Image (cartoon, rainbow, N blue to C red):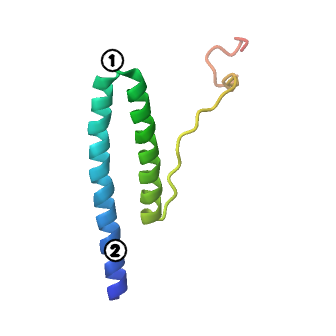
Amino acid sequence: MSRLDIAEREVKLELIASIAKSQHALSRILSTVADLTDWSPETAKHIGENVRLLTQLQESMAGSVSGWPLRRCTRRTGKPAPPWLNKQLHPDANMKL
């Protein structure tokens, strides 16, 4: 392993440690926001938006360090299809679905 590879790994490890510290700080901020919501909902909303933006930044940084894109869960809308059941295997085979 060359010096450049070692230096790159050290930088990546430092960045990951920094992201972990930042996540800990964000959890403390979210705890404060939860307490603040009763007193000032508007301020809590602004802080929550800033936390969301910081989280997105951390996700992109973690993705660039790891080389793996992080996928966010997306909310899907629509009507789900009825379950497909094999009538031969279903105990109530005569039941209409």
Secondary element under disc 2, as helix, strand or loop, is: helix
The answer for how far apart the CA atoms under marks 2 and 1 are is: 45 Å
Question: Which percent across, then down, holds residue 27?
Answer: 30, 39
Q: Residue at x 42, y 46 (%)?
A: 55
Residue 4, quarter of the rendered image: bottom left
Q: Residue at x 27, y 31 (%)?
A: 32
Q: Amino acid at mark 1?
A: Asp
- Disc 2 designates what residue? 9
Secondary element under disc 1, as helix, strand or loop, is: loop
Residue 83: mark in rendering: none
Question: Which percent across, then down, holds residue 42?
Answer: 42, 24
Q: Which callout, 2 or 1, points to the residue nearer the camera? A: 1
Image quadrant containing the N terminus: bottom left
| Residue 47 or residue 25, whichever sits in front | 47
Residue 74, quarter of the rendered image: top right
Q: Residue at x 26, y 38 (%)?
A: 28
Q: Residue furthest bottom?
A: 2
Relative height, residue 86 to residue 28 (above, below)? above
Question: Which percent across, then down, holds residue 60?
Answer: 47, 56
Q: Is residue 26 left or right of residue 46?
A: left
Is residue 81 at least partly visible in the picture? yes
| Residue 93 or residue 18, whichever sits in front | 18
Answer whether labels 2 and 1 touch (C-beta < 8 Å): no
- Disc 1 designates what residue? 38
Relative height, residue 50 to residue 89 (above, below)? below
Residue 50, quarter of the rendered image: top left
Q: Residues within 10 Å of mark 1 (few under 14, many from 20)?
A: few
Q: Is residue 94 left or right of residue 34?
A: right
Relative height, residue 96 to residue 2 (above, below)? above
